[in-house]
């Protein structure tokens, strides 16, 4: 990772008197602050954000970033979205980046930076480019051996930078106007090229100062495109085509790194050309159109959608594009896959069975070239079509019978269209939302690699702000909601019209199924009362608590009818043991993986 810190442009103080400003007898020649909106570091940063597609910055003010926020606000193309806390600001930037391709957040030094770092780590794990901007100390304080507020009380206040080095792909500490232009542009371009978060710290006294390097409108970025090694590409395609064309019933499975590789369309082109049965890993749901004629569902080992695992695991060849095989996606390392049958396509290399690896090859180039070389083969899909039995319907509820989760998601399914997007929180919603059939154009997001409980509240805020033409439907458990509930306030302030289904089952259900204990039971809240209190009489907020199917139907009719222009919060009361069968299976296998005894020494 690349860390660049500007050289300090002030001399160390001749006096070390406590509480005295640095003084070296030299009269400062720094220019007076530029009027907001004119040529300055703050305006340059604001214009750059707009140029790359960021129109909303999720922020929490603090004394080190206030002047910078003034300049972000002054940019006509930017809206500053004030969040209730830094963690949610980071989650919101994560959700925004999923919809727009890049997101941005702004916080203050250390107390803000270390609060947002969990969200930035999640974005790093999910390959999301986020520009994380931190208002830093006055440039004169670097190297003075002084102790600053908002730090841990040591003269060395680089702790925040060192923490961010492990969860960002580039860090820039801007404390000198001479190279500020270069540092900012390098950081932003690195985020876009690497599809990872970057950290930019800007000294609090620099944002408003004019400098010749900021005197003109920033020239738009023109990033050099990545190119495949043509000889390696040709060899990889040749080897893969030979491997697949001699197989009897090959299948293809899309993984989450299709997004970072910009290879979703190329993957679909390959499916069209090959006629292979087409599946996705759980964390790739929404990246591949489920209306594709050869789509067979989600491959997730023992908890796959019906008949999908049987087809994938019985294939004599499979091509995985952009997979992540971790303990969660492999259901406790229990997938029945064999390396000698697999072609693994990474964003920049291809591995064929137990044989050769080809590097410096872009995934989208490989998939498009391979599509021209494969013989159509529908055998696996025809096998799926023969054994497939449509899912049954949940048992019909008796009048006023307590609501069941499977009934809830039957009704959620009917709400989906090209004008909606689904956000699934970590927990049982992972499994219930995997079974939703996404219509053409319907968005879908969840955070599987990092799996941070509470992510979905901020992500819903950010996604809804980025794609205002869609109505976001978020499925959130009560335990997760308690962690990040405050930014319902920000959703209301932004006039968002999302629908949140708060699934109240009295605790951390996903943890219960991995390992139960009294720590998984939480204090019950009056969730609708809480949201009503946050809305404080707003006419654009509507809440309802439902306990049976009749009330659920009424709530959905209101949310999609007379309250369609409101933020809608529906608290769904369900039994604490009402979980999907997939969570029961997955939880036991993950528990088994977690509880493996130490290997003999």
Image (cartoon, rainbow, N blue to C red):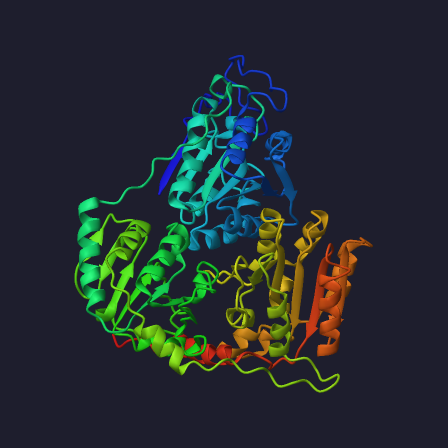
Rendered view: 14 above or below 455: above
15 relative to 395, above or below: above
Q: Position of residue 530 (x, y in %)?
A: 75, 62
Whether residue 61 is visible: no
- Compare residues 399 and 517 and report the one nearer the observer: 399
Q: Which residue corresponds to the image point at 28% horizontal and 65% vertical from the top-left?
A: 376
Nearest the eye: 31 or 219? 219
Q: Is residue 156 left or right of residue 69?
A: left
- Among the 4 quarters of the image, the one containing residue 357: bottom left
Residue 238, position as x, y percentages in the image: 18, 56
Would residue 255 appear left or right of 357 to someone viewing this image? right
Where is residue 305, by image quadrant?
A: bottom left
Q: Is residue 367 left or right of residue 207?
A: left
Asked if one can make out residue 481 in the rendered structure from this viewpoint, the answer is yes
Residue at the farthest right position:
537
Q: Is residue 189 above or below residue 417?
A: above
Residue sitting at 38 percent across and 81 percent down?
386
Q: Is residue 509 above or below residue 43?
A: below
Q: How many marks?
A: 0
Locate residue 494 relative to residue 578 in the image: left or right.
right
Which residue is pictured at 53% across the width and 50% down the height? 99
Q: Position of residue 353 (x, y in %)?
A: 21, 66
Quadrant location, the C terminus: bottom left
Image quarter in which the N terminus is found: top left
Q: Nearer the viewer, residue 466 or 296?
A: 296
Q: Residue 83: x percent and y percent?
A: 64, 47
Q: Quadrant of residue 308?
A: bottom left
């Amino acid at each position: 990772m690349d860390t660049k810190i500007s050289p300090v442009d002030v001399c160390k103080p001749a006096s070390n008197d406590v509480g005295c400003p640095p003084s070296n007898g030299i009269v400062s020649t720094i220019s007076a602050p530029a009027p907001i909106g004119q040529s300055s570091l703050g305006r340059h940063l604001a214009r750059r954000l707009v140029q790359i597609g960021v129109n909303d910055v999720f922020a929490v003010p603090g004394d080190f970033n206030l002047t910078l926020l003034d300049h972000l606000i002054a940019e006509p193309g930017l809206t500053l979205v004030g969040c209730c806390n830094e963690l949610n600001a980071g989650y919101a930037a994560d959700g925004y980046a999923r919809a727009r391709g890049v997101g941005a957040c702004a916080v203050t030094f250390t107390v803000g930076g270390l609060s947002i770092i969990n969200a930035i780590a999640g974005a790093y794990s999910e390959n999301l480019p986020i520009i994380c901007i931190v208002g830093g100390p006055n440039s004169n304080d670097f190297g003075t051996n002084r102790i600053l507020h908002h730090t841990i009380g040591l003269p060395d206040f680089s702790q925040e930078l060192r923490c961010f080095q492990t969860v960002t792909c580039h860090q820039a500490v801007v404390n000198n106007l001479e190279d500020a232009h270069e540092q900012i542009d390098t950081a932003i371009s690195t985020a876009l090229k690497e599809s990872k978060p970057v950290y930019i710290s800007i000294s609090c006294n620099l944002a408003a100062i004019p400098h010749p390097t900021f005197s003109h409108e920033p020239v738009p970025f023109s990033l050099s495109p990545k190119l495949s090694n043509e000889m390696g590409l040709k060899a990889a395609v040749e080897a893969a085509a030979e491997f697949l064309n001699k197989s009897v019933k090959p299948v293809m499975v899309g993984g989450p790194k299709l997004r970072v590789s910009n290879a979703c369309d190329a993957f679909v082109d390959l499916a069209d050309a090959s006629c292979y049965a087409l599946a996705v890993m759980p964390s790739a749901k929404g990246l591949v159109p489920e209306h594709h004629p050869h789509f067979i569902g989600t491959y997730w080992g023992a908890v796959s959608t019906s008949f999908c695992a049987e087809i994938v695991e019985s294939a004599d060849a499979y091509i995985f594009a952009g997979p992540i095989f971790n303990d969660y996606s492999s259901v406790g390392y229990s997938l029945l896959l064999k390396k000698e049958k697999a072609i693994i396509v990474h964003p920049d290399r291809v591995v064929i069975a137990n044989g050769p690896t080809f590097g410096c090859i872009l995934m989208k180039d490989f998939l498009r070239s391979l599509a021209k070389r494969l013989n159509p083969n529908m055998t696996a899909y025809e096998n799926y079509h023969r054994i497939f039995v449509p899912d049954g319907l949940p048992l019909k509820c008796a009048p006023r019978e307590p609501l069941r989760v499977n009934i809830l998601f039957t009704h959620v399914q009917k709400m989906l269209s090209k004008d909606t997007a689904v956000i699934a929180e970590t927990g049982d919603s992972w499994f219930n939302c995997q079974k939703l059939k996404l219509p053409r154009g319907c968005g879908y997001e969840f955070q599987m690699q990092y799996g941070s409980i509470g992510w979905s509240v901020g992500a819903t805020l950010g996604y809804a702000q980025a794609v205002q033409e869609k109505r976001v439907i978020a499925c959130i458990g009560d335990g997760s909601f308690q962690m990040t509930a405050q930014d319902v306030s920000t959703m209301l302030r932004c006039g968002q019209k999302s629908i949140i289904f708060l699934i109240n089952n009295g605790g951390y259900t996903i943890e219960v199924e991995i390992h139960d204990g009294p720590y998984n039971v939480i204090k019950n809240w009056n969730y609708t009362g809480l949201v009503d209190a946050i809305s404080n009489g707003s006419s654009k907020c509507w809440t309802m608590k439902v306990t049976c199917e009749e009330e659920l139907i009424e709530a959905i009719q209101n949310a999609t009818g007379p309250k369609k222009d409101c933020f809608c919060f529906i608290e769904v009361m369900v039994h604490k043991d009402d979980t999907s069968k997939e969570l029961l299976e997955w939880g036991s296998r993950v528990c088994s993986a977690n509880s493996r005894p130490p290997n003999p020494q």
